[in-house]
Image: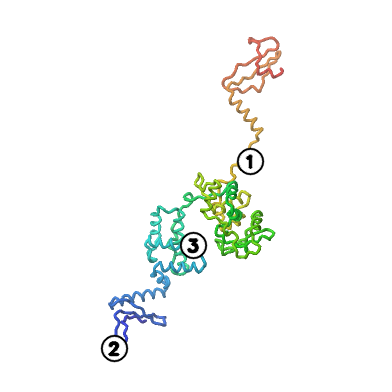
């Protein structure tokens, strides 16, 4: 084992020059080459202590008792250096420049406001304290800041620069019920009015509401992607233009296919954009909404914009009876919760009409008779006692009149033999219907 400190010496013009700062040299058992490193001190005793610390750390590494060298080097590097490497990797993987810029802006703000300079400064507590003090940010924005920071630390973990993500146990903010912007879908009447005033931009609106394509996806469609001569016309959306980088075949409604045939150039290039100059900007769309008398925000605070056309596409599929699996496939969602939650406008669901379709558990005819009888008995406190009808010398009782309630009318006797037995001859009107 070799372990010593020294000051470098060299001859210049025949004279020996000794360096001012100490250096260290060590070689452990099992190693074939000695390692030399600068110690950055003029004190020999301090240089020996520094070298011993390095040697002990190296011995622990060889014994598997401490972190690996890449982790130690990463811990000593500033976080900004790791961030630059992370962003360069994203660009090399062809992530969109807007996505990279958003990540850079958010992560750098966290570095500055949380005072994160090195990995040792990063902690879950410091992030949660920063998040608690952000009063101007919405829940969605706070969620995006957390995702941005986690994406960096997960990348560092994957590239052997970090043991584990320090924010992995930080809980997510609750976003449901705290949305600052709530989107709604267009009704059929609103779509007709919007198309009526849109002019040249009507085709862009119609294509968005009948395909579910996003604004950038629709703007990237080329004539080479449109296949109008097929038995079922479709657009083959290229993977380079979709959000999830997957290619999709989107079938066209016959009305939209006919409109595209009318504008298709006879000798157009395959890379020519189909909807160039036909997709309205938000400013132009607001003008169309105003002309069509469609409020941007309704009484419930729900707004409409270009992306609401994609939501309208999903809702029209729902109202047409498409299953969740079909809608998820046509919307190109990886999670059905996006289809049934985020992109579902519950105000347009046919809920009231289904109530009358619930099964009837009572027979209306027998039920009405029974209820009427019960109501009559319950509302009649004075029920006659059993009536004795005298025919000659025979007495008979009507069983139907037995079982009266508390206040009972006196028994009425009807005498057909001319004998009244002390009771004046009287016939109850309620008994006239019977033939004695």
- State the residue position of label 3: 98
Residue 153 in the image, given as x and y percentages of width and height? 44, 64
Q: Is residue 113 above or below residue 412?
A: below
Q: Is residue 114 left or right of residue 424?
A: left
Marked residue nearer the N-terminal end (1 or 2) = 2
Residue 41 position by quadrant: bottom left
**Relative depth, front residue between 354 and 311:** 311
- State the residue position of label 1: 359
Mark 2–mark 3 Cα distance, whole angstroms, equals 61 Å
Marked residue nearer the N-terminal end (2 or 3) = 2
Closest to the camera, between mark 1 and mark 2, is 2
Q: Is residue 61 left or right of residue 276?
A: left
> Cβ–Cβ below 8 Å for labels 1 and 2?
no
Q: Is residue 292 left or right of residue 231?
A: left
Mark 1–mark 2 Cα distance, whole angstroms, equals 109 Å
Residue 251 position by quadrant: bottom right
Q: Residue at x 37, y 62 (%)?
A: 115
Residue 393 in the image, given as x and y percentages of width and height? 70, 13
Q: Is residue 20 left or right of residue 373?
A: left
Mark 1 residue crowding within 10 angstroms, few (<14) / some (14–19) / many (20+):
few
Q: Residue at x 59, y 23 (%)?
A: 380
Mark 3–mark 1 Cα distance, whole angstroms, equals 54 Å
> Cβ–Cβ below 8 Å for labels 3 and 1?
no
Residue 220 in the image, given as x and y percentages of width and height? 57, 61
Closest to the camera, between mark 2 and mark 3, is 3
Quadrant containing the C terminus is top right
- State the residue position of label 2: 15
């Amino acid at each position: 084992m070799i372990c010593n400190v020294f000051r470098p010496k060299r001859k210049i013009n025949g004279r020996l020059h000794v360096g001012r700062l100490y250096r260290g040299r060590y070689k452990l058992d099992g190693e074939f080459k000695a390692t030399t490193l600068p110690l950055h001190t003029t004190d020999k005793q301090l240089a020996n202590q520094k070298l011993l610390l390095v040697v002990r750390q190296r011995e622990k590494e060889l014994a598997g008792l401490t972190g690996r060298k890449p982790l130690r080097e990463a811990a000593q590097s500033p976080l900004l250096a790791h961030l630059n490497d992370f962003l360069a990797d994203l660009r090399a993987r062809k992530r969109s420049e807007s996505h990279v810029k958003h990540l850079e802006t958010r992560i750098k703000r966290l570095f500055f406001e949380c005072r994160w300079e090195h990995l040792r400064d990063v902690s879950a507590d410091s992030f949660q304290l920063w998040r608690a003090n952000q009063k101007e940010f919405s829940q969605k924005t706070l969620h995006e800041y957390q995702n941005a920071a986690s994406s960096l630390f997960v990348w560092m973990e994957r590239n052997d620069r970090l043991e584990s993500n320090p924010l992995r146990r930080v809980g997510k903010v609750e976003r449901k019920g705290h949305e600052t912007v709530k989107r709604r879908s267009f009704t059929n009447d609103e779509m007709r009015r919007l198309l009526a005033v849109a002019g040249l931009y009507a085709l862009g609106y119609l294509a968005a509401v009948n395909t579910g394509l996003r604004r950038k996806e629709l703007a990237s469609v080329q004539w080479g992607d449109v296949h109008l001569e097929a038995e079922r016309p479709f657009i083959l959306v290229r993977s380079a233009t979709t959000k999830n980088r997957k290619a999709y075949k989107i079938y066209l409604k016959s009305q939209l296919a006919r409109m595209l045939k009318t504008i298709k150039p006879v000798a157009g290039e395959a890379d020519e954009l189909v909807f160039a100059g036909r997709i309205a900007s938000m400013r132009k769309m607001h003008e169309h909404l105003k002309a069509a008398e469609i409020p941007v925000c309704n009484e419930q605070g729900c707004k409409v914009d270009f992306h609401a056309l994609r939501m309208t596409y999903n809702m029209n599929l729902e109202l047409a009876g498409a299953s969740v699996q079909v809608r998820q496939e046509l919307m190109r969602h990886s999670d059905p919760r996006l289809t049934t939650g985020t992109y579902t406008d519950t105000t347009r669901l046919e809920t009231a009409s289904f109530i009358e379709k619930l099964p009837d558990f009572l027979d209306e005819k027998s039920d009405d008779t029974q209820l009427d009888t019960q109501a009559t008995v319950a509302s009649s406190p004075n029920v006659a006692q059993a009536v004795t009808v005298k025919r000659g010398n025979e007495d008979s009782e009507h069983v139907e009149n037995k079982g009266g309630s508390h206040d009972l009318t006196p028994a009425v006797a009807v005498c057909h033999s001319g004998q009244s037995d002390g009771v004046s001859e009287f016939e109850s009107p309620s008994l006239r219907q019977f033939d004695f």
